[in-house]
Amino acid sequence: MTQISGSPLDENSYVLETRALRAYYRMKYFGIDREVRAVDGISMHVRKNEIYGIAGESSCGKTTFIKAIAAAIRPPLEIVAGHVNYNFINNDLYALPSKERSAIRWRHLSYILQGSMNVLNPVRRIHKTFEDFAFRHMHMGRSEFEQEVKRHLERLRLPAEILRAYPHELSGGMRQRVCIALATLCKPEFIIADEPTTALDVVVQKDVLAMIRETQSEFGSSMIFVTHDLAVHANITDRLGIMYAGRLVEEGRTADVFSNPMHPYTAHLIASLPRIGDIHPRNALTGSPPSLADPPKGCRFHPRCPLAMEICRHENPALTTLAEDHRVACFAASATVQPTSDEKPQHPEALETVR
Amino acid sequence: MTGPLLQLEGVSKTYRRGGLFGREEFRAVDNVSFRIEDNEPQVFTVIGESGSGKTTLARMILNMVRPTAGTIFFKGQDLASMRGARARRIFMKDVQPIFQNPFEAFNPLKRVDRYLLMTAKNFTPARSSAQLEAAADRALKKVGLSIGEVRGRFPHELSGGQLQRVAIARALIPGPSMIVADEPVSMVDASLRMSIVNLFRTLRDDLKVSIIYITHDLATAYYVSDRIIIMRKGEVVESGSARVVLENPQHSYSQLLKSAVLSPDPHGRGVLTGDSAASQQARASPHPQIDNLEPQVR
Ligand SMILES: Nc1ncnc2c1ncn2[C@@H]1O[C@H](COP(=O)(O)OP(=O)(O)O)[C@@H](O)[C@H]1O
Ligand SMILES: Nc1ncnc2c1ncn2[C@@H]1O[C@H](COP(=O)(O)OP(=O)(O)O)[C@@H](O)[C@H]1O
Ligand code: SF4
Ligand SMILES: [Mg+2]
Ligand SMILES: [Mg+2]
């Protein structure tokens, strides 16, 4: 196993690395096994001090991937294969005893989710929620803690008055800012944001995104930022991974992915974005994304792909580096793209470390 | 039919708020006037942030909510003077709604084809089950689906985009001359949005249906609309040809909205802290969002 901790970190060292990660929902319906292959062989890494974006249509597996890297696995979701490594633990996340694993979630990881009301307790004033969340982890006296909370709010340009408010007394945008303040109070090494601005109005969204960006740069945290909205990715992420049907199909610097998309799915997504000032007709893709309970063989995009060839129906294209910092999983993109196994690996090492 | 298809004259809706001490009148929709001509089907877009009164306006146009002041005429008839079940049914046949969240609009325990068959039964002469299915299939074909794809399916078995198409197909069955679509794409992915708004164009051009498209998404509004109004706190702050207004908004609020639209062309890090109107405003005040501290009434 590659070891990445120990040495001083530079911009290119990894904070998170996943290898061939597979997470399936496994259920029994009327005695029949059903498997939803929501994350199916994802290998990627997040560097120090970057915002790594994940895009893709709804149900492609974005949230499941987040659950898998955050050790938030509950039945029927299972880690079926692969590895998750953070540089602040010297081991595979899923090789740790479950107690240690959940300690990691609290100590090193932090979340900003879409529904702020799930995080904020509706019957407690905001300052109580701060206490519930963070007091134990901050290891300081109560008045010192209160000072620290106020300092933090000030840094994020939030008025201290909000501490006395109940969640329902705040607007949606304000609640989302409070969630960001909560998520960053302990200066987390790694922040996970899942559709954090999807429910907000545009003006508020822009401010909240700016706040996320500023907070992340100030603390030098690394972040995974999930949203289906490519315009948001264009404005906040450093690198971007495009997911389709449980797999990563393209990944690169955000600017490169937008200016030179190499996977037909990415190219379609970007070409179909509406822009004020441009009335060119935008064509929609035909068909719908596949069911992850019974995905098509080979390249999962082939039933909808205008460039599909014979090989695409049988073989799964490997995510391959085709330009600097730019990986693509498409046979049509380059002859160097080779088939890779479609099946989950059965070798003992993978099964041993994953349970 | 001559004269406008739809005409609103000084339409307002006031709600009373507050409890024990002092009641407060609150204008959800404030003195809105516009007209949609009958001779030219169009996509008429209502833009506004949440709480600006869009849904209240839509419900008044659908005759589900009575205005507190002002008049709404549909094909020359004052909606307030409409009497009797028959008149209502004729109106409903002609003006059909599509709601925001397709997963809420459909009962999760009811097969989606039931909705189509019920609508066909209520609003068309079809009676036998073969005729009803044929009516449903004709409508589904117009949105790129077929009865075979939805027969016996429950809402959760369809994707959000498919479900929103079914909702549009259902609205087409009675053969309406106007569809009121309240945030029809807010809950679907960006990639599916375009297929829905493309569909609106087709309905306008091929079926001559006028669409009232309610949204907060300026980019799709620009792409698909003929005319727009921009609403803020119940009032129309700007209106006109969609291209003209969105390319060169005159009202400061329209300008703020446009400046907050995220361009899909990446600018790299730091663009968000740049000099948008919104962030300038934010920096001008030490407590930028203090006005948001007011209780939000739902
Ligand atoms: N608790 C669950 N049980 C079974 N299937 C699930 C569950 N949660 C999600 N799924 C399925 O897993 C797939 C991926 O879902 P998700 O990760 O939520 O996608 P995204 O976040 O991209 O919208 C979908 O097909 C979804 O229906
Ligand atoms: N039945 C109602 N009673 C009281 N207030 C209402 C009612 N319906 C809507 N409102 C208020 O009217 C305003 C406009 O709401 P709405 O029309 O739903 O706006 P939008 O659809 O633009 O978000 C909001 O402040 C809302 O709280
Ligand atoms: S591998 Fe084949 S089917 Fe898949 S995206 Fe490339 S060309 Fe299309
Ligand atoms: Mg999700
Ligand atoms: Mg509304």
Image (cartoon, coloured by chain):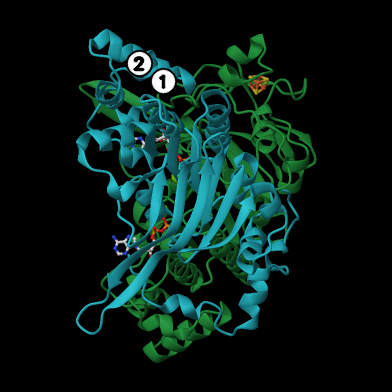
Q: Quarter of the picture for ligand 2?
A: bottom left
Query: Residues under labels 1 and 2: Cα distance?
Result: 6 Å
Q: Secondary structure at mark 2?
A: helix
Hey, which quadrant is residue A107 in on the image?
bottom left
Looking at the rendered structure, the kind of residue marked 2 is Ala
- Between B104 and B117, the residue placed more toward the observer is B117
- Between A2 and A61, the residue placed more toward the observer is A61
Residue B125: x and y in percent read 28, 16
Hey, which quadrant is residue B223 in on the image?
top right
Labelled pair 1, 2 in contact (Cβ < 8 Å) = yes
Q: Which chain is green?
A: A
Image vertical order of residue B266 relative to residue A116, above or below: above
Using residue B123 as the reference point, say whether residue B226 is left or right of it.
right
Q: Residue furthest right?
A: A324
Mark 1 Cα shell of 10 Å, populated few (<14), some (14-19), many (≥20): many
The residue identified by callout 1 is B139
Residue shown at 51% from the left, 52% from the top: B34
Residue B109: x and y in percent read 22, 32
Host chain of mark 2: B
Using residue A318 as the reference point, say whether residue A88 is left or right of it.
left
Q: Which mark is residue B135?
A: 2
Residue A47: x and y in percent read 66, 54
Residue A181: x and y in percent read 49, 72
Image vertical order of residue A136 relative to residue B15, above or below: below
Q: Secondary structure at mark 1?
A: helix
Q: Is residue B7 visible?
A: yes
- Between B82 and A200, the residue placed more toward the observer is B82
Q: Which chain is cyan?
A: B
